[in-house]
Amino acid sequence: MKSKDIRRDELTNRLSSFLWKEGKLNIKKVSGIKAHVLLMETQNNQKYILKRHKNREVLLQQWDFFKSIHNEFVIPFHPFPNGREFLSYRNNYFTIAPYTEGEKLNYKSAEDRKAAVYTIKNFHREARNIYLKRPVTRKHFLVKWHDRLLAFKQTEDLFYKHGFDFLFKDIVQTTAFQLQLLSQFPWKLLENRAQRNGTWVHGDVASHNLIQTAKQTFIIDFDLLHCTAQIYDFIQLGQRFLPYEKWEIEELTKYNMIPENQQKMWAYAVAVPSDIIREWLHFLNKKPADVSKYLTSLDQEWTYRQYFFKSIRKVLN
């Protein structure tokens, strides 16, 4: 047996021992999904997702939320067999959730895009009048996007090094301009109303957080759960749909994600290229080798995004 396999077996045995001792969860098989997510199969053939958390307050908020919402589209945490809601070990916290057999959505598929809108709308319908004792305070998305732009500016040298200085300047100028346009809308009013009404958003509507089974689509991973205006989930969703909707605002509006009286602010928010900046920063965090190839692709995507800006002005002005 290779030393790598031996180390894996040792880790599995230690984890199984920990889960039995602290949670009375009797494991016979462990499979990796992500670095912090494992699929566990018990001795009585039940399957659970084990997740490791770093932030205790975020974890507690999720537990409180799951106790307050009863929604068929949500996959909540489940107590360990001994009744404990989570286990602790060296500033790490572990939860389990029932394993659901299914496939992640793929936003390239029109049917999957429709399923995402339908599922999130149903989740939003139930994620109201929920008031938690310890809600996690999060930055307003506009503040977060400003911070993201500042981080992006720190990468200027990479653009110049690979001959994409004009792309860098254009992204910075356009983002700053779009953020300024966005600031004219009453976001604070919407946020205050959301907090009064106890309305919540999922916070990360990436396709991998929606699992489709033979019967329906479920939402998972509520780490970015937030009490705020529900338009925010649909701003994210609009940005994620854009490449598959011909970069046309008219195509996006066909999904009827938001009320008509919020359509203009939603469209201008979707236009902010915060998603492009986010993906660039994620890319750099992986310490990549081929930056030039990524920037070549980004340059092409930016051409499409500019077309989207024009489509917005054509429809909304």
Image (spheres, rainbow, N blue to C red):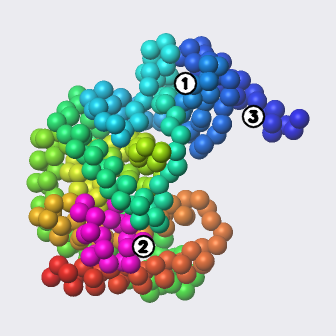
Residue at the spot of label 2: 243
Q: Amino acid at mark 3?
A: Arg
Residue at image coords 37%, 38%: 74
The residue tagged 1 is 89
Tag 1's secondary structure?
Answer: strand
> Which picture quadrant has residue 231?
bottom left
Q: Earlier in the sequence, mark 2 or mark 1?
A: 1
Residue 168 relative to residue 158: left or right? left
The residue carrying pointer 3 sits among few (fewer than 14), some (14 to 19) or many (20 or more) residues within 10 Å by Cα, namely: few
Number of the label disc, if any, that sits on residue 18: none
Q: Position of residue 312 (x, y in %)?
A: 24, 79
Distance of label 3 from label 1 (alpha carbons): 19 Å
Given contact means CB atoms under 8 Å apart, are the residues at marks 3 and 1 in contact? no
Residue 144 at x, y percent in the picture: 32, 57
| Element on which disc 2 rests | helix
Residue type, mark 2 in image: Pro
* Viewer-side residue, 252 vs 175: 252
Residue type highlighted by circle 1: Tyr
| Residue closest to the far right | 1
Residue placed under numbered mark 3 in the picture: 8
Identity of the residue drawn at 30% across and 26% down:
67
